[in-house]
Image (spheres, helix red, strand yellow):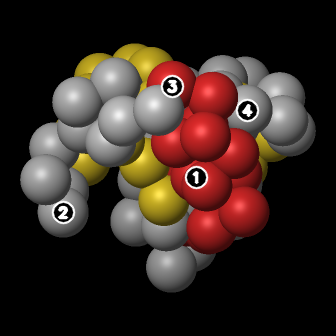
Amino acid sequence: MLGRYERGASGEAVVEYGDGTMRVVKPGAYVRCAVTGETIPLDALRYWSALRQEAYASPEAVLTRLRQTGRP
C-alpha cells in the first residue's frame, strides 16, 4: 500500500520484525533479503524471521535459510 510508510523515504529502511508485525525504526524505501541480497520494497515485504531479525524476498529464500541453519 503506497503511503503506508514514510512518503518520499529513500534508501534502506531499518525494521524491527515481530511475530506477524513489523515496526519501521528508520524510514526507507526497501530492506535487503538476508539470503539473496536483493532489495525488497517495504510495501512488498511478506517474509521475515522475528527470531533472526531478517527479511526474505520469497518463500524459497526462507527455505534456503532454514537449510543453511538447520533450524527455524
Residue 35 marker: 4
Looking at the image, which residue is at 23% across and 30% down?
51
Q: Earlier in the sequence, mark 3 or mark 4?
A: 4
- Asked if residue 28 shows in the view, the reply is no
Give me the C-alpha separation between circle 3 and circle 4: 12 Å
Residue 44 coordinates in the image, percent (x, y): 62, 68
Q: Is residue 42 left or right of residue 18?
A: right
Could you tell me if residue 60 is visible in this image?
yes
* Three-letter amino acid code at the position of disc 4: Val
Q: Is residue 13 above or below residue 7?
A: above
Residue 57 is situated, as x and y percent measured from the top left of the image, at 70, 54
Residue situated in front as seen by the camera: 7 or 32: 32
Left or right of 13? Residue 15 is: left
Q: Earlier in the sequence, mark 4 or mark 2?
A: 2
Count of all numbered marks drawn on residues in the image: 4
The amino acid sitting under disc 3 is Thr
Q: Residues within 10 Å of mark 2 (few under 14, many from 20)?
A: few
Q: Quadrant of residue 43?
A: bottom right
Q: Which residue is mark 2?
A: 20
- Residue furthest to the bottom in view is 1
The residues bearing labels 3 and 1 have C-alpha atoms spaced at a distance of 11 Å
Q: Residues within 10 Å of mark 1 (few under 14, many from 20)?
A: many
Q: Position of residue 71 (x, y in %)?
A: 36, 36
The residue singled out by tag 1 in the image is: 62
Query: Which residue in the protein does label 3 denote?
Result: 69
Q: Earlier in the sequence, mark 4 or mark 1?
A: 4
Dividing the image into 4 quarters, which one contains the C terminus? top left
Q: Earlier in the sequence, mark 3 or mark 1?
A: 1
Amino acid under disc 1: Val
Residue at 83% x, 29% y is 37
Q: Residue at left 47%, top 32%? A: 70
